Image (cartoon, helix red, strand yellow):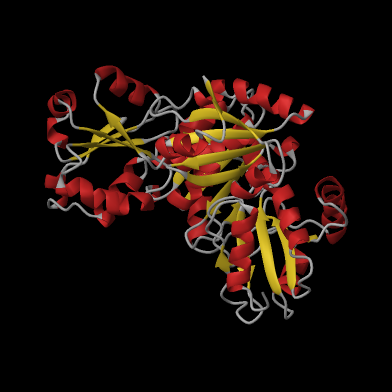
Amino acid sequence: GVYILDKTNIDKFIKESLTVMVLFHNSSGESEDAIEELHSSQKILGRIKFNPPRVAMYEISSAEDYRKFELAKAPSFVYFIEGKKNNFGLLSEASILHIFQKVEGRIIPIQKQEELNMLIKECQPYSINLMYVGTEADEEFLKFIEFKDSIKGIRFSICNSNLCQEKYSKALQSFVLFKNFLPNKELIYDRTLTENEFNKERISEWVDLNSKGYVMRFTERFLEVGFNKTKLALVIFRKESSNKVKEYNKMLTSLAKKNDFSHISFYASDIDTDEDSKKASQYLLISDKSKLPMVSIYDNRDGDLKIYPFKEDKKITESNLKKFIGDFFEGNIERATFSQTIEEANKEQKEIGKKHAAGDSRVKALVKANFDEEVFQNNFDVMVLFYANWCEHCHEIMPLYERLAQYLSLNEKLKFKKIDLSRNSIDGFKINEFPTFKIFPAEKKDNPLEYPGNALLGEFSNFIKKYATNP
């Protein structure tokens, strides 16, 4: 259900909730629509079976409410984790799922058989769960707490009941890894095989090695966090309706099983039927669907994603793909580059400015061709939003970024820029998620600083004032 909050209970409610989504609304028509969306969001929240977030509404009654919760307008949707604001944006499936990914780092307690069954069932392709078997007082568990945040893209749980100790006796004071794809759907971290070592390096290596299948479906989840984890991937974009799907699967599975290619992840993406694949195609330089199937290697080993396409005039066979991979490692495959035109970016930004800015937009859209000039070859402090056109949450952040640029518009030494990395390839930046904000201080252009906080106007402003050369 949805909780109704007021001035007498909101602070206590937020403080006592592990996670809570609050819709701040007023009597406007927009708020009525947002309230309907809030109720419909229950279906989305149904995906979170353990410790699901509480949902609440708060009617804004004074200007003090706007200041207290740093609200720019109503209706506004704010997400709190353990009392701390973690998101600001519109109420939509995109924002809810974006936040859900951030919450996945929490550790879910497992006590009953039905909870364990649900956990295993929820490891849908291609979700992964790492469960510690033991108690929260164990020395091993306390070590794990210290480095768990470095293991990206998976969920965590702990089970100290007799159920788990009997079923996974070999994993006592150790881990079980659950996944729903081959090979090895259920694995135990056997410390006897790792010289009884229980540290960040050993466990992270074990998780990375075992959290991929022979051939995986290229989901949006892997688009956002997978490259940060897998580093090197070969992806085939195809049509599921093609009569060669089974042939391609067999081909990729055969390559994936080869020891020579054990450090490469193999993905298949069906553009015609899979929404995740459609989004992935926008980001991964798949513009002409008439040329399917298409194959590329994606290299993120240094944190700067590079794309190496398989030649269009080559037939996709196992032997040709094997040679393609070999040529890649020998440095004989040319990297793909891509860019919007300045005219395209300016036209698009003009429309966005009309929609979100109070007047003329203070945010300038960059492309590959003018990025260095606009960011590095000047004496300004430059704030840059790195985003992807397919990222719905990025578009929801745009109005806030426009308001931030307007709010600080009196500072002529501070410039606001943005660049769409789904349509412009630039080198030298480690972008692990979208959206990402970086400030390039006027006197330290070679040392940009990433904004680490939440999308709140006051926090953004304070960050810029702290690190800009000309605050």
| Observer able to see residue 353 | yes
State the image coordinates of residue 446 (x, y, percent, origin top left). 59, 77
Q: In percent of the image, x 67 and y 21: which residue is there?
A: 36
Q: In percent of the image, x 61 and y 28: which residue is there?
A: 274
Q: Quadrant of residue 2?
A: top right
* Residue nearer the viewer, 331 or 178: 178
Quadrant where the C terminus lies? bottom right
State the image coordinates of residue 468 (x, y, percent, origin top left). 63, 74
State whether residue 316 is above or below residue 336. Answer: above
* Residue nearer the viewer, 108 or 291: 108
Q: Is residue 404 left or right of residue 451?
A: right
| Observer able to see residue 322 | no
Q: Quadrant of residue 174?
A: top left
State whether residue 421 is above or below residue 182. Answer: below
State the image coordinates of residue 273 (x, y, percent, origin top left). 64, 25
State the image coordinates of residue 100 (x, y, percent, origin top left). 50, 36
**Which residue of the protein is positioned furthest toward the top in this rendering?**
114
* Residue nearer the viewer, 14 or 431: 14
Q: Is residue 187 left or right of residue 302?
A: left
Q: How many marks?
A: 0
* Residue nearer the viewer, 256 or 276: 276
State whether residue 346 is above or below residue 291. Answer: below
Q: In percent of the image, x 32 and y 30: which residue is there?
A: 185
